[in-house]
Image (cartoon, rainbow, N blue to C red):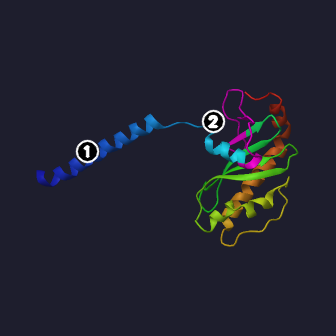
Amino acid sequence: MLDKIKPPLVLMLICGIICGLLIIAYEATYIDTTGVITESLQNGLNEIYGESNTKYRMLENEDGTVKTYDGITSIIINDNGQVAFEIIADGYAKGGLHTLVGIDENGNLKNISIIAINETKGLGTKVKDKTFLDQFIGINSDDYKIDNITGATYSVNGIKNAVNTAINAYNEHREEISNELFKGVH
């Protein structure tokens, strides 16, 4: 009887120890990047506004937490009046489109940077093509027409939702964002 119980018990013990070690390793190496302009965000900002020595900062609430609006992960501004909205949108995959939507000082869409994409290769990933994204440049309302990508309807709709979220948030909170611009860069 002991011969039949012993192998599963040993295997269970080994799995428990390995799980515990994985949890310890995760806790020891996890870095919370909330409120930090990471290298990938900086690259996205450079893609939207061009590389420069411009300093960007995330808008914060009075308690120091990152300011968010409905559907927006963070709002990044600089002292030139430029605003970028970090948005994680659903495409074919839930949360499959990590985008940065840049708005210029006149309230027009400057550009879109895809920070990360987890969509179907060869179909949904076509939304990161420059020819597709360039269709959005200059819009300033959620009333626009663009050419869709055949076979990538969900991904296209995800990008449209991200753009609409950014434009609507900018238009709704323009005064609040403008007031933040005068506080200067930290």
Rendered position, 138 above or below 122: above
Residue at image location 16% in from the left, 50% down from the top: 6
Is residue 149 in view? Answer: yes
Tag 2 secondary structure = loop
Residue 99 image position (x, y, % from top left): 68, 51
Residue 158 image position (x, y, % from top left): 69, 59
Which quarter of the figure is the C terminus placed in?
A: top right
Residue 150 occupies which quadrant of the picture?
bottom right
Tag shown at residue 36: 2
Give the residue type at disc 2: Val
Tag shown at residue 149: none
Residue at image location 81% in from the left, 49% down from the top: 168
Decide if residue 171 is on the left or right side of residue 73: right
Residue 65 image position (x, y, % from top left): 66, 31
Which span of residues is magenta-colored? 47-75
Residue at image location 65% in from the left, 44% down from the top: 41
Tag 1 secondary structure = helix
Does the magenta-highlighted stretch encompass residue 133? no
Rendered position, 147 above or below 142: below
Q: Residues within 10 Å of mark 2 (few under 14, many from 20)?
A: few
**Foreground: 171 or 31?**
31
Give the residue type at disc 1: Leu
Question: Earlier along the polypeptide chain: callout 1 or callout 2?
Answer: 1
Q: Which residue is mark 1?
A: 13
